Amino acid sequence: MTYAGHVLILVGIYVVLASSLQLVAGYAGLLSVSHAAFYGIGAYTAALLAVRGVSEFPASVCASYVLGYVLGIGVGWLTVRVRDDYFAIATFAFNLVVVSVLNNCVWVTGGPMGVAGIPAPRVFGVEASSLGAMLALVYSVALLSLLLCYRIARSPYGRVLRGMREDEVFVLSQGRNVRYYKLTVFATGAAVAAVAGCLYAFYVKFVDPTSFSVGESVFLLSIVIIGGLGSFWGGVIGATVGVVVPEALRFLGLPVAQVGNLREIIYGIALILMMLARPQGLVGRFRLDVE
Amino acid sequence: MEQLLVNTAVAASIYCLVAVGFGLVYSGFRFFHFAHGALYVAGAYACYAARIGAGLPLWCSALLGIGVSAILGAACDLLVYRHLRKRRAGATALFVASMGLYAVIQNAIAMIFGDTNRTIRTWSVVEGHRIGDARISTAELCIVGVAVVLIATTAAVLRYTKAGIALRALSADADLSRCAGVDLDRSAVLVLVVASGLAGCAGVLIALDTDITPQMGFWGLLMGVVATIVGGIGRPAGALLGAVLIAAAQQISIWYLPSQWKDAVAFGVLFLALVLRPHGLMGQPIRKATV
């Protein structure tokens, strides 16, 4: 039962991550390979605040959200000026810089040792340490973020994003400030990813740089692509498949180190097959393969 | 000072070998060949397997390493890229598929050889040769020598042979050159073989100088990409200039900052390049948008 709860919590966290990446990559067409960096920034924010005595969950969420948003604006300001695969490489580089900073600023982040001993979160003074309370927290955040994505996707703002993805010059010709849209959606995605980091830090009670590597960013991008870019359910399905399938691998009885490798090989193959056979993902509408 | 120059030359040689191959693929086929980084690792590990595993002589295992990379490169095209091209898939679809290939190759290597550091250096460490006040080891001399010869050869092949002219025509206008009788599929295999051979060579050379890990592909790839972007795409001379700039920036930064920051410095240079001169120092302006 505890194990099922654990898997459910992970699914919830990945739903938050996938739906926020869906905003950036799916709706706006910005293939960001830095989502794990913002996830990590949120996790470290919550962790460092908590070990210094601030374990009030709403406060950590606000702090992560604001920090994620501000950094998202900063990084977006540098990266949205380049297009497509250049954007992917630029964000990729940012992710590596973040991991490098987490590893090397030992006096703040604890370096490769990470931050351990994160206390249980408190919600308005009440400690939420049980599995049930954690589930409730994770799923309320997941619902909120899904709601946010849904609202954005259905709004005029979301329509501009989709237009930008299909034909940027056309949107520009309609008098829309493409840069403003790209910046704000990138920052919003980053901020929501940071909130997911908050959940992760309070659930796992330990953060270290390896959880927020470029590999994780590629993994997040691949679950969104496998689920289906630009589709509301695509992110949810991608997150569920992305968490549950590797858990199933555990029962094959392979050494732990190889399970990680096998997981990534499966995602690699899935990505290739998706591109070859079903470029719009399992339930998506937006095809990556059309010029 | 002399040591700084020597170190810059050694680092630049490796970056440049990776960058030239990466740039060849990019200029001909307009997509980020992410798997290039994994092929570089594959070269190093094939050499390791032949030297330590099978006990072959060093020159033989080096050739084997280069060969394995070249074959894997050709396989990438024959199994994946070719089919995507046939359906006129966009650069983004190719990029995503190539991330998948990267994940598969790198993790397959990690599964076979394990995640720990390996080395092919069975010889004892001796004092290097002297150049002025600087010292350079035989392996490092080897790196610089081989890189200079290979890069000059590639540049000459691109400039003077029929295959080179065909590739340059493809990079200028793919549709027109196909009308003029350039066989796209054949050139693609050829380019991937040459590019991957160069990457494999870089992998073998790095294995002569340091330990190898399956994860080194990220850095190898990124330094190559950074050098390509900074220098400008489509010209070996641009890649050389980019590689020297990156290597020099890193080596100089070691004087002022702790050495673990040298990768972050490389990305600082990348960001600057993307912001100030996105088409590179020697390249033509990149397409901002297609109407």
Image: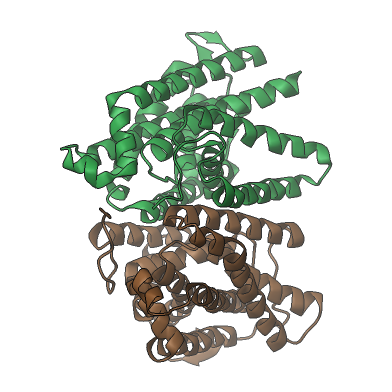
Depth order, front residue of A26/A163: A163
Quarter residue A166 falls in: top left
Residue B43: x %, y % from top left: 64, 73
Tell me: A3 left or right of B266: right
Quarter residue B225 falls in: bottom left
Tell me: A230 left or right of A234: left
Is A180 drawn above or below residue A111 in the view shown?
above
Residue A242: x %, y % from top left: 62, 36
Q: Is residue B244 visible?
A: no
Quarter residue B117 falls in: bottom right
Residue sitting at 53 percent across and 87 percent down?
B146
Q: Is residue A94 visible?
A: yes
Residue sitting at 48 percent across and 53 percent down?
B93
Residue B51: x %, y % from top left: 75, 79
Depth order, front residue of B201/B174: B174
Specify the colour of chain B. Answer: brown
Judged from this view, the residue extending furthest toward the right is A253
Residue sitting at 50 percent across and 35 percent down?
A284
Depth order, front residue of B221/B196: B196
Q: Quarter of the image containing the N terminus of chain A?
A: top right
Residue sitting at 43 percent across and 79 percent down?
B182
Q: Which chain is green?
A: A
